[in-house]
Image: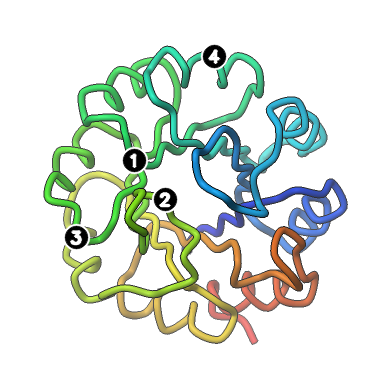
């Protein structure tokens, strides 16, 4: 069964509601050099994650400038996994993966996508902007991403997923997991409880 991660949490109530909806993982965005209403301070991310119950994973989403900075954030936030967007080369991601669960987030057309897949514990394939950041709310070529599922690395599908299209995405790609942020929001940075319920149900093929 496909796993579900929801990302970009800013409020504790939304995290609690996502857990009730049945997500497998929640993500908080920290220390990114782009403007986004979903970014939170390091201490706030740590508080959000501290309240997450066992068997739901916490994922620190960031764009670190170095492995040392990523390690510092891990020490302060204490996530179950780190998801890195842009900046770090495959060798740097591999160094992180030797210490913790590391997910490399890449654009679907990233030239070094297989190198990142080899380096990381998971590969999140997203629709990215010029900075390499995700959260664009745009879908990409799912058939191209489907080819990546033949790799040994688990593939997480992201980019423009909503309760309305996630089932089609899962059927087309067959990913290990799906990830959404803006697609389950009432407004930027604030989740919609009904949308989270619908997204989890649709991803798993439930009415």
> Which residue appears at 56% of the width and 55% of the height?
5
Left or right relative to 140: residue 143: left
Q: Quadrant of residue 18?
A: bottom right
> Which residue lies under the disc numbered 2?
133
What residue is disc 1 on? Answer: 86
Name which of mark 3 and mark 1 comes first in the sequence: 1
* Image location (x, y in percent) of residue 49: 73, 34
Kindly report the distance in space between the C-alpha atoms of the residues bearing marks 4 and 3.
30 Å
Q: Are marks 3 and 2 in contact (CB under 8 Å)?
A: no
The structure residue drawn at horizontal position 57% and vertical position 30%, both measured from the top left corner, is 80
Mark 2 is surrounded, within 10 Å at the Cα level, by few (under 14), some (14 to 19) or many (20 or more) other residues, namely: many
Residue 148 location, quadrant: bottom left
Give above or below for 162 relative to 8: below
Is 78 drawn above or below residue 111 in the view shown? above
Instruction: List the residue tagged with mark 3.
Output: 109
The quarter in which the C terminus is drawn is: bottom right
Secondary structure beneath dot 4 equals helix
Q: CA distance from mark 1 to mark 2?
A: 7 Å
Question: Mark 4 = which residue?
Answer: 72
Check if mark 3's residue and mark 1's residue have beta carbons within 8 Å.
Answer: no
Q: CA distance from mark 3 to mark 2?
A: 14 Å
């Amino acid at each position: 069964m496909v796993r579900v991660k929801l990302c970009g949490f800013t409020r504790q109530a939304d995290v609690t509601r996502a857990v009730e909806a049945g997500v497998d993982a929640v993500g908080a965005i920290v220390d990114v050099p782009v403007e986004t209403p979903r970014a939170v301070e390091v201490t706030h991310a740590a508080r959000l994650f501290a309240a997450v119950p066992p068997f739901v994973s916490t994922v620190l989403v960031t764009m670190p400038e170095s492995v040392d900075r990523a390690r510092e954030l891990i020490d302060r936030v204490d996530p179950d996994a780190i998801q890195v967007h842009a900046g770090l080369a495959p060798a740097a991601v591999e160094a992180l993966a030797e210490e913790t669960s590391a997910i490399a987030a890449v654009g679907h057309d990233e030239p070094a996508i297989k190198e990142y897949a080899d380096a990381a514990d998971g590969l999140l394939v997203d629709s990215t902007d010029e900075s390499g950041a995700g959260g664009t709310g745009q879908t990409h070529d799912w058939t191209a991403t489907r080819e990546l599922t033949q790799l040994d690395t688990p593939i997480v599908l992201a980019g423009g997923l909503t309760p309305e299209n996630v089932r089609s995405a899962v059927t087309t790609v067959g990913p290990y997991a799906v990830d959404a942020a803006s697609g389950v929001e009432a407004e930027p940075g604030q989740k919609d409880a009904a949308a989270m319920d619908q997204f989890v149900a649709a991803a798993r093929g439930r009415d």
